[in-house]
Amino acid sequence: MASRDDEMRDFLYRAGIESGAVDSALEIDAVMQQWRRRFRKRELGASALRDLKLDDRLDLAQLDVLIAIWAPSKEFTCKAGQETMVATVAERLAIDPSRASRLISDLIARGLARRAVSQQDARRTIVELTEGGKAIVRAVRRYKFLLMGDFLSGWTPEERATFLPLLDRFSKWTDEAPNMASDHFVEEIAALVAALPPVDGG
Amino acid sequence: MASRDDEMRDFLYRAGIESGAVDSALEIDAVMQQWRRRFRKRELGASALRDLKLDDRLDLAQLDVLIAIWAPSKEFTCKAGQETMVATVAERLAIDPSRASRLISDLIARGLARRAVSQQDARRTIVELTEGGKAIVRAVRRYKFLLMGDFLSGWTPEERATFLPLLDRFSKWTDEAPNMASDHFVEEIAALVAALPPVDGG
C-alpha cells in the first residue's frame, strides 16, 4: 500500500531524516517483521523436533527451556561459570518464574534435567541438564547448523565477509533504540502524543 | 565456550560443509538469537507505549492485535483488499482464536476497533480499526521509524545499498530451512536420531 509508505516518508522527511535512510528503514523493517513472525511460529524448531522424531515426546516450550539451561554463551551473554537457577531460566526466556518452574519439573520428570546444589552457595538449588538433555540440545543444534551452513555454502566468501559486519552493526540498533527516543526526538514525540485521541482505560 | 563451537565445527566439517560457511553460520546465529530474545521481550514496543504515554491504557498484546488488524502489507504478505476476521488476526499473530477474540473484544470496548459486515460476503463479520485505533498504529509506527531512520542516517548510502540485498537473501534461509532437511541430509539426520537416548513420554 504505497499511500501508507508515502505518508510515513513525508513524516520522516519533515523530521529531518534523509530519504535514503527512510527507504532502507522501511525495507529492513519488512524483513525483520517477517523474521519476527517466523520466530513466533517456531517453524525451524518444529521441523527439528519432527525430523529428529522428538515431537511426540517434547514440545517447543520444553525445548526452549532445555536450551536456556544449556545456555549458549553467545546467545545469552552470560558470564562464564554462571549457574542456572529457575529464576535464570525465566529471565533468559522472558517467561514468568512459575511457568519456568513448571516446565523444568516436566523436564526433570522426563530425565532431561536435574536439580543440584550450587558449588558457589550451598543454600542455592541450581538446575542442570542430564546426559539425555544434553544429547537433545546437541542434536537440535547440529540439525540447525547443518541447514544454515549448507545455505551459507551457496554464498561467496566475499558475500559472507561483507554481510556479517553490517548485520552486526545493524543489530546495535535493536540495542540502542529503546533508549534513544527520549533524547533525540523530544519535540516530534511530544507532537505524536498530542495528536493521539483519548483511549478508554482498561 | 570454544569447546562447544569446536565440536560443532568438527561435526559440520565431516558433513561436508566448508569451514567459512560454518564460521558465518555460528556468528549470524548468535546475532539472530539475540534478536529473537529481544523480540520476545518487546523492548521497542514497550518503549513506544511508554514514550507515547499509552502504557497505562494499552498493553503489548493489544498493540500487536491493533497492528495485525491494520495489516501492514509487506509484513503479512496479504492480498490487497483481504478482509480481516478474528481468524485472520489469530493466524497473523500465531495465537489461538479464542485469545484473538478476547483481545479484539477488549479493543472494541476501548473504542479502538469495531465489528462490521464484509462487503464481499454479508454472512461474514470482519474487524476493522476505528479512527482512534488507526491513530495509535500510526503513532507507534512513526515512533519506530523515527528511531530506525535516524540510526540508518549514520550509514553511508553504499553501506545501506550493500546490506539490504544480503539481508533479503539471508532471510530466504528462514523460508526454506524448515523443509530442506529431509531432502539434503537424510543420512546425517538419521545418525542424529540414532544417537539420541530414549526420552520418557509426556
Image: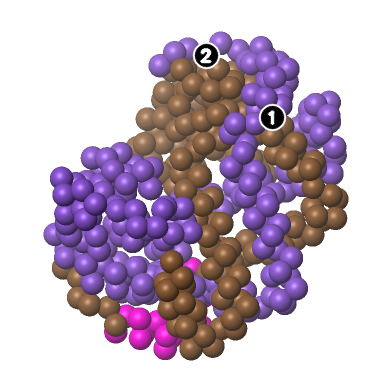
Chain colours: A purple, B brown
For label 1, the residue is B142
> Which quadrant would the C terminus of chain A be assigned to in this image?
top left
Q: Is residue A2 above or below residue A139?
A: above
Left or right position of B100 against A33: left
Place of residue A2 in the rendered image (x, y in percent of width and height, measured from the top left): 78, 40
Callout 1: helix, strand or loop? helix
Q: Which residues are magenta?
A: B178-194
Give the residue drawn at x 36%, y 36%.
Answer: B99
The image quadrant that residue A189 belongs to is top right
Place of residue A173 in the rendered image (x, y in percent of width and height, measured from the top left): 65, 43
Q: Amino acid at mark 2?
A: Val
Task: Characterize the local packing of mark 2: few (<14), some (14-19) or many (20 or more) Cα atoms within 10 angstroms.
Answer: some
Place of residue B20 in the rendered image (x, y in percent of width and height, measured from the top left): 63, 78
Q: Is residue A31 magenta?
A: no
Give the spatial CA distance, label 1 vs label 2. 19 Å
Place of residue B2 in the rendered image (x, y in percent of width and height, measured from the top left): 46, 70
